[in-house]
Image: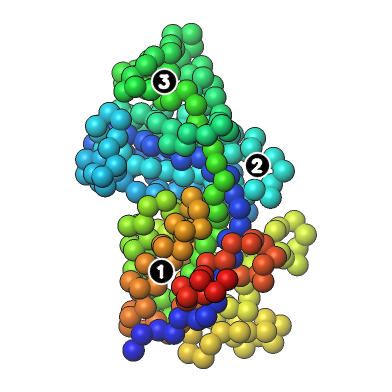
Amino acid sequence: MPAIVEDTYAEAFRSIYVEFLITARDRRWVEHAVQAATGNASSTILCDCEAGLDRYVGPEGDESFATPDGRPGAIVQLHMPRFRKDRVEALERAAMVRISQNVLTCPTAACFNLIDSEHFFRMGRKIAYFGDGFQRRIERYGRKMWWIPTLGGEFILDRRLGYAEGLMGGNLWYFGETADAALDAAEKGVAAVQQCPGVIMPFPGGIAGSGSKAGSRYRFTIASTYEKYCPQLRDDPHADSQLPEGVQSVMEIIMNGRDLASISRATQAAIAASVDTPGLLRISAGNYGGRLGKSFIHLHPQRDAES
């Protein structure tokens, strides 16, 4: 019997984000660059940004997306909440650190901007200072780029890195009668989202086993465990448990993306792929009644037409 899909919504909030393409000699080295460039970026609760893989492209990936140099590649997004007053400076810093320390250093890698916008960072020039005066401007693949000599050969990247408005905080909650059932369902959801362009899942393997609520009793942190949904606090009267009967584990997928349509498509794909998982009791989502964001991603798609 399929799991119950609750008539609720995920509450996404605005972000600014950069999107860039990493290419390398082969898929293995693309994967190394992606893993390094998106590491320690699950949540802006403490990380410098939220980062993740959109999809692999070119040879050995989605071949409908041709890379400029014809090599295997991967599309990566970095997101910063728009409510941060220093969002522009913080996003630039996160991008500069991750590209310079994790992409430039990866053997055979190159980096290409994917957002053409009036808003941009002069990322290429700043990272090119690593060339210590030997760097130079070039034109290659019909693009204006910086060339940096390296011990491995060269590193090239576009002169500009554009940024645009996106969304953060799309999510799905999987309620399982066991931890294995909840995790199996979430893994199926992740696999479906990975086929949806324009969306990233910043947590390890795409899944958060420690879903949080906004706020805390401690003033020094902005988020904390969601005690109402912790199975092992079911009998604690101070937790005011709201878990459905029989639920022993809750796993969450968090999705950031280019726009509401992209995250909505990914949400429906994840539900369809996971709803029949044995032992999955319910699929839901986290929201704050519109206090966090104004973009609602309904689990019942007909609600989108009504709103």
Q: What residue type is labelled 3?
A: Met
Q: Which residue is drawn at 64% across and 48% down?
A: 82
Q: Position of residue 229 (x, y in %)?
A: 58, 78
Q: What element carries label 2?
A: helix
The amino acid type, in three-letter code, at marker 2 is Arg
Mark 3 lies on a secondary structure that is strand
Horizontal side of residue 282 vs 24, given as left or right: right
- Name the residue tied to disc 1: 268
Left/right placement of residue 245 relative to residue 186 reads right
Which residue does the numbered mark 2 point to in the structure image? 87
Q: What element carries label 1?
A: helix
Q: Where is residue 261 in the image (x, y as percent from the top left)?
A: 47, 58
Residue at horizontal 46 percent and vertical 40 percent from the top: 19
| Residue 250 visible in the shown view | no
Foreground pick, 86 / 167: 167
Badge 1 vs badge 2, beta-carbon distance below 8 Å: no
Q: In this view, does 181 lie above or below 124?
A: below
Mark 2 closeness class: few <14, some 14–19, many ≥20 residues within 10 Å = some
Give the camera-side residue of 200 and 202: 200
Q: Quarter-wise, where is residue 90 in the image? A: top right
Residue 223's disc number: none
Residue 258 visible somewhere in the drawing: yes
Residue of label 3: 145
